[in-house]
Image (tube, coloured by chain):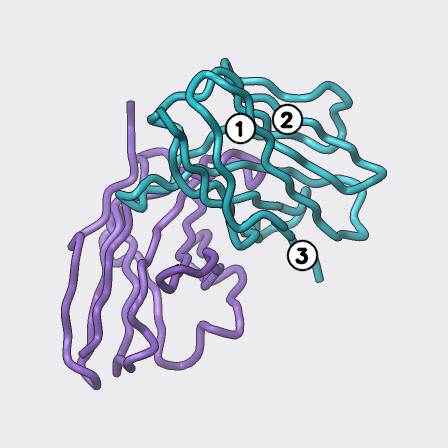
Amino acid sequence: EPEVTQTPSHQVTQMGQEVILRCVPISNHLYFYWYRQILGQKVEFLVSFYNNEISEKSEIFDDQFSVERPDGSNFTLKIRSTKLEDSAMYFCATHGDRVTDTQYFGPGTRLTVL
Amino acid sequence: AQTVTQSQPEMSVQEAETVTLSCTYDTSESDYYLFWYKQPPSRQMILVIRQEAYKQQNATENRFSVNFQKAAKSFSLKISDSQLGDAAMYFCAYMEYGGSQGNLIFGKGTKLSVKP
């Protein structure tokens, strides 16, 4: 069964450093999302991406964050200057050619900012 | 803004028994989708079940079923014949229908323990 993959599974970085989290969507999916889950808290929406542009973003998704799909397969989330409070699990989710299709989540990237 | 509330931070069930997890939501929309996701210790998010608000029939998936009460804005998950592998965090989620975004709004989750 096709699945969403994410790399790395765990990223440790120093505060102020840039990180790039990568997601490979299911091949025929067109809608992409990033979510964040701080340890012990609920999953929060960050940003949605469709047709090579951001569809919607939450208030969490400030200027430190950016997303792109550089090569038509990978979908990346970049955090320019990480802060301690960026430590969280980051999930990529994708769904098919209709926005009402079920979203499938990747296994997540655990980001630790020291 | 839409909100999702899960009032049970933790629940426990005996193996082979039935347990019901509660979820309420707030929306002014008439068409939307509701989901239950399971998050085991690996922290992977796994879709358990999905309900379209326009469908009156409650969704079922094997041992998992929902009780969808649209007027009450309630969406509970029933797990029958509980198994040790059901132990996980369970998140209720809402998605607006017909929008161009499709982002999910999650509740805070319920931690389910299964006793052998």
| Residue bearing mark 1 | B49
First reached walking from the N terminus: tag 1 or tag 3: 3
Figure quadrant of residue A96: top left
Disc 3 with disc 2 on a shared chain: yes
Total of numbered circles in the picture? 3
Q: Is there CB contact under 8 Å for labels 1 and 3? A: no
Name the kind of residue labelled 1 in the image: Ile
Whole-Å distance between the Cαs marked 3 and 2?
A: 19 Å
Instruction: Kindly indicate which chain is depicted in purple in the rendered structure.
Output: A
**N-terminal of the two: label 3 or label 2?**
3
Q: Is label 1 in contact with label 2 (beta carbons under 8 Å)?
A: yes
In the foreground, B25 or A105: B25
Q: Position of residue A27 (x, y in %)?
A: 30, 35
Q: Chain of mark 3?
A: B
* Residue marked by disc 3: B3
Q: Colour of chain B?
A: cyan
Q: Which mark is residue B22?
A: none
At x 53%, y 24%, the residue is B79
Q: Secondary structure at mark 3?
A: strand
Judged from the image, the secondary structure of the residue bearing numbered disc 2 is strand
Have a look at marks 1 and 3 and say if they share a chain. yes
In the rendered view, would you say A50 is above or below B84?
Answer: below
Q: Is residue A68 left or right of residue B49?
A: left
How far across and how far down the image is residue B1, in percent?
71, 62
Question: What chain letter is assigned to the residue under label 2?
Answer: B
Q: Badge 2: few (under 14), some or many (20 or more) residues near its Cα, within 10 Å? A: many
Q: Which residue is mark 2?
A: B66
